[in-house]
Amino acid sequence: MTNIGTVIDGKYEILKEIGRGGMSIVYLAMDKRLNKQWAVKEIRKRGNGKNDEIVVNSLLAEANLMKRLDHAALPRIVDIIDNGVTIYVVMDYIEGESLDKILAAEGPQPEDKVIEWAKQLCDALGYLHSQKKPIIYRDMKPANVMLKPEGNIKIIDFGIAREYKEQNLADTTVLGTKGYAPPEQYSGQTDPRSDIFALGMTMHHLLTGVDPRNGEPYAPVRQWNPDLSEGIEAIIDKCVQPAAENRYQNCSELLYDLEHPELIGRDWRRRQQKKVRRFGIVAGLAVLFAIVGVVCSLVATGINNSDYDRYLGDGMKPDDFYKAIEIYPERTKAYDRLIEYYKSLYIKKDETNEASYEEDIAERIKELKLLSNTITSANGTILNQDETDVADLNFKMGMLFISQREDLAFENRAKEAAPYFDLAVKSQSSFAKKEVARGFSDICNFFVAVTKTSSRVLSDYTVLFSQIETELDELDHLDKDDRDADYEKIVFYHVVCSLLFDQQNQLADFTDEETPPHKEAIRLLKDIYDRASVITPKGNDEVRRLKDLFLSKASAERISQYEAVFKAIESNSAKGGK
């Protein structure tokens, strides 16, 4: 056990113990350099037995898995320290209370709350399952879900999560929580459907208060509480089918039903069946052949729909998304999945392996080019530019290219992003973020024009700064409930910062003007630094990372250095004029 007050690795001061279990203890710690609180998990290598080895390895696996994940419902790993005797894993400190404690204090939870939590959990599990090597969480239960003060959830304890490998007929080590874990977790290979079973048992526990670890025979939720809807009962019953092939096959299917529980109750199914029978009686033999034709058409459409949904399921890869596009190229969902996939694969520069980094960048550019060519081709022939979801798709493509920080040079990002922002702006649809897209379009097109000619006039910068101010005002008025608002703000701050630092030499040509543009550039840099400083990530780890990156990139020290260059030029100019 680490003593309170101990400073680990010269940075993390242990403040207090906040949890323990098995071979690990979790402490609250303060980063003395950043003045920020973190959770530190201490793992003692205390024995040589098989069980100790399994637990230590599972805890290390947890850290290594989480290091590369980036999702709002998953905690970040920021540091791993191994002194030979003890391993310290430094991660996000999550304020809130676990669902099992809420259940113990308050009893069964309201259906609407449980559905909302389940949707967030389903989204997080879907993210894990969609990794290049799908990750199976394998320990979903109320105790492993934290409810934060603002109402969002975080999944904790990845000690038994494991990457899914199709060739493995059985997992090598059986771990899990009795009652929540599906049958195959004890006798065979787990897959994404195993997590769906555990999520179903978690929902059952939260709604009924019946702890599955006590060995109580499973009974549908309405037998415990008749006031619950038939829809939620049908959803849970399907999740917890003993045979995996009878459950939801992926989290996308489950999420859809969680969003529409009223559509799958038995009463609804009976009403639909009555409508079908009534229609058949009225229609009669007079339309038999027409019905046969329609049925054949519907069967063909059903096959396409089934294949389309399957290709967009959890754990699918870009090749599958492209197959979905081949089936329905006019629909935007498959394009959106590709964008989200590449957005999640941020390439971090590795100074120790430059060659590998360059190879990764080259491969990323190739992949993005394929995506760009596919959408550009569809834009010209299939996608209706005046539909809102198509305008949204083009905006997302622009954001994907412009936000690739280390993956592409800023010049290339601007060139690739500009046409997509332009399309979003030109759309005749009621696309809500058209003015936001216009701001990005203006900045990108300015930079593209700069690269074509070195000749700029003072009025060019006057117009540019006015466009930046307009965009800042537009971003300030985004809906507070817009989940992407902070992301779009911080990306725009990055873009402006990159542009103004890039234009330093050109701005220096106008220091003798009555109103030199570099003064406005400095004011803008200071303004967006202040704006970025007050952004609250609200559980969005991508926004948090971008914010931290921006504040280091546009630090007060660097802005001062930027300003000092112009002061030196002005000083030299004044001396020359004497």
Image: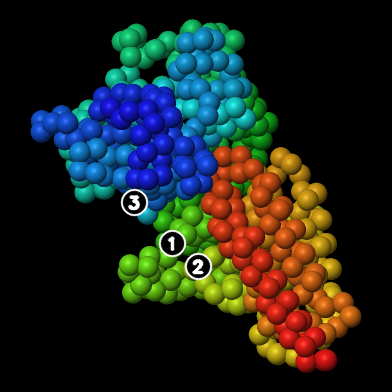
Q: How is the image coloured?
A: rainbow
Q: Are marks 1 and 2 in contact (CB under 8 Å)?
A: yes
* Residue where numbered disc 3 is placed: 133
Q: Amino acid at mark 1?
A: Lys
- Mark 1 and mark 3: span between their CA atoms? 18 Å
Q: Residue 512 versus residue 101: which sits nearer the camera?
A: 512
Q: Amino acid at mark 3?
A: Lys
Circle 3 sits in a helix, a strand or a loop, which is it?
loop
Q: Residue 561 versus residue 53: which sits nearer the camera?
A: 561
Check the picture and name the quadrant holding the C terminus: bottom right
Q: Residue at x 16, y 35 (%)?
A: 53
- Can see residue 214? yes
Q: Quadrant of residue 132?
A: bottom left
Q: Is residue 352 left or right of residue 186?
A: right
Circle 1 sits in a helix, a strand or a loop, which is it?
loop
Q: Earlier in the sequence, mark 1 or mark 3?
A: 3
Q: Earlier in the sequence, mark 3 or mark 2?
A: 3
Callout 3: few (<14), some (14-19), or many (20+) C-alpha neighbours within 10 Å?
some
Q: Position of residue 117 (x, y in %)?
A: 54, 28
Q: Is residue 463 left or right of residue 201?
A: right
Q: Quadrant of residue 189?
A: top left
* Residue where numbered disc 1 is placed: 348
Q: Residue at x 75, y 82 (%)?
A: 571
Check the picture and name the quadrant holding the N terminus: top left
Circle 2 sits in a helix, a strand or a loop, which is it?
loop
Q: Residue at x 56, y 53 (%)?
A: 548
* Residue where numbered disc 2 is placed: 406
Q: Residue at x 47, y 16 (%)?
A: 101
For residue 517, above or below residue 476: below
Q: Quadrant of residue 16?
A: top left
- Mark 3 and mark 2: span between their CA atoms? 23 Å
Callout 1: few (<14), some (14-19), or many (20+) C-alpha neighbours within 10 Å?
few
